[in-house]
Amino acid sequence: MKCPLCHELERELQGRQRDYGETLASSHHRVNTKFAAYKRVELECVRNELEEHQFVCASTVKQRGPRRHAA
């Protein structure tokens, strides 16, 4: 079972991906690419936050198993 923060961050990421896709598909994107760049930055921030959380989240660590250290 995923923790509530993982779930919320995944939902936020999906929403940002949808917003970014809609921005790229819009006619405004051809005129002003700064808005699309802003949406891309927002998307990457949420993606990074999710990845950082999953690195330390107990529920995610249990799903992928213990990390093995290189010898």
Image: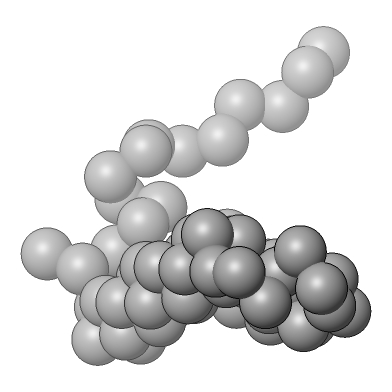
Q: Position of residue 23 (x, y in %)?
A: 57, 71
Residue 56 or residue 11, whichever sits in front: 11
Between 33 and 3, the one lying in front of the other is 33
Question: Residue at image x 76%, y 64%?
Answer: 30
Name the spot of residue 44 as percent of width and height, x first: 70, 67
Judge whether 71 appears above or below 28 on screen. Answer: above
> Where 53 sits versus 17, above or below?
below
- Give the vertical position of 7 relative to 17 (above or below): below
Q: Is residue 46 left or right of residue 34?
A: left
Q: Residue furthest left?
A: 1
- Residue 58 lies left or right of residue 28; in this view the side is left
Residue 52 visible to the viewer:
no
Q: Nearer the viewer, residue 54 or 29?
A: 29
Q: Residue at x 56, y 35 (%)?
A: 67
Q: Position of residue 58 (x, y in %)?
A: 38, 67
Query: Residue sitting at 47 percent across and 75 percent down?
Result: 19
Foreground pick, 52 / 31: 31
Horizontal arrangement in the rendering, residue 14 relative to residue 46 (left or right): left
**In which quadrant of the rendered image does the N terminus lie?**
bottom left
Rendering quarter of residue 59: bottom left
Residue 38: image x %, image y %? 79, 82
- Is the C terminus in the top left, top right, bottom left or bottom right quadrant? top right
Q: Is residue 38 above or below residue 40?
A: below
